[in-house]
Amino acid sequence: MSKKIRVFVVDDSVLYRNFLMNNISADDRFDVVGHAVDAFDAMKQIPQVKPDVVTLDIEMPGMSGIDFLKELLPKHPVPVILVSTLNIRVFDALAAGAVDYVRKPDFSDKDAAVSFVERLRSKIYVASFSKVRTPQQDTIDTRKPLTVSQENIIKETAASNLKVPVASAQKIIAIGASTGGTEAILSVVRNFPADMPGVVITQHMPAGFTTMYAERLNRICKMEVREAKNGDHVKQGLMLLAPGGYQMRVQKMGNGYTVSVTQEDRVNGHAPSVDVLFNSVAQNVRDNALGVILTGMGADGAAGLLRMRKNGAFTIGQDKESCVVYGMPMEAYKIGAVCQQASLLNIPPIIYKKLGIIK
């Protein structure tokens, strides 16, 4: 039998802490090697216990989970799964270096508790393979040569006077991601100019969190960002995020495009699914599209991206070095779905060049 994944649990609630420890240790893949009641306790124990994965509540007395991450991860880069209520601070914790999140269940709903345990175990397993990234690491990637100089990347992608050529205005950019994707997506889109062609995004994320994530992107980005609703038009200056629990597709409507947002079965284990989005873009947008597949476990999106490429779209895959989990982009690359592989820092300028925004 392979070596068990060592898990450390941090939660100030006795009820949740015991629930987590019992249900994690009941899985033969995991060994719960310790627990802490607050961040201070965890800070003492984790360097000694050396777990493979930590589960962490965000709201704790004394020191919040976010401040804890900022102090812990630069010294001890261990993958952290957030176990939290529906809380906007989850995204601050992901920005601080946590690799994934799962929403705490309502114990009065037995089915929800069972579903939570399955999701948590799956996320712990994926986290054990993931790469921990801190905000400092994501600023400049010096491990490989950049396709354009770092100075030009920063200057060009942050410039407020970038203009989209008329010929590119009606194109569509489709982005898909999973584990590590919330920060990866933000890194790619945050400096898109306000008149950027329409963007459609599928990030594996549960209901509720997609609403908050869209609001977060909207506060930070120059483009308008919304959680998609059925019938929304895909248009210049607008970014649409697939809602958790639904499948989103791009449809042709006259001379333009709309999205269909429907509640239906999971595809590749996901709702929303990246393949569902990419397949619709391949079928209906064809060579008028750009496709981007980012960090994430599994193969969701790989087949759809290949179909996009075969139908004339330009496709980009995030490279291994800059991924939290090099799964989805790797599978896409292996089957020939990726026209160009690039670091997270290089993806925006590549998109700008394909659209004629920069030379």
Image (cartoon, helix red, strand yellow):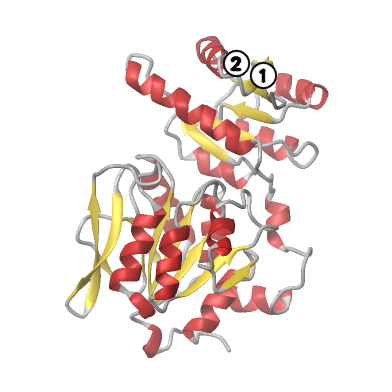
Q: Quadrant of the C terminus?
A: bottom right
* x then y, percent, for residue 12: 58, 16
* x then y, percent, for residue 135: 68, 52
* SS for callout 2: helix
Name the image quarter holding residue 329. bottom right
Q: Is residue 11 visible?
A: yes
Q: Is residue 41 left or right of residue 176?
A: right
* x then y, percent, for residue 130: 65, 43
Please name whichever residue, 198 or 159, is drawn nearer the observer in this view of the structure.
Answer: 198
Name the residue at 42% across, 74% down.
Answer: 310
**Residue furthest out toward the left:** 254
- Figure check: 88 above or below 58: below
Q: Is residue 162 visible?
A: no
Marks 1/2 in contact by CB < 8 Å: the verdict is: yes
**Residue furthest out toward the front:** 1
Name the residue at 51% across, 15% down.
Answer: 16
Residue carrying label 1: 31
Residue type marked 1: Asp
Q: Quadrant of the N terminus?
A: top right
Q: Is residue 126 left or right of residue 189?
A: right
- Figure check: 211 above or below 106: below
The answer for how far apart the CA atoms under marks 1 and 2 are is 6 Å
Count up the numbered dots: 2
Name the residue at 57% across, 48% down.
Answer: 180
Q: Earlier in the sequence, mark 1 or mark 2?
A: 2
- Figure check: 138 above or below 204: below
Residue type marked 2: Ser
Residue carrying label 2: 25
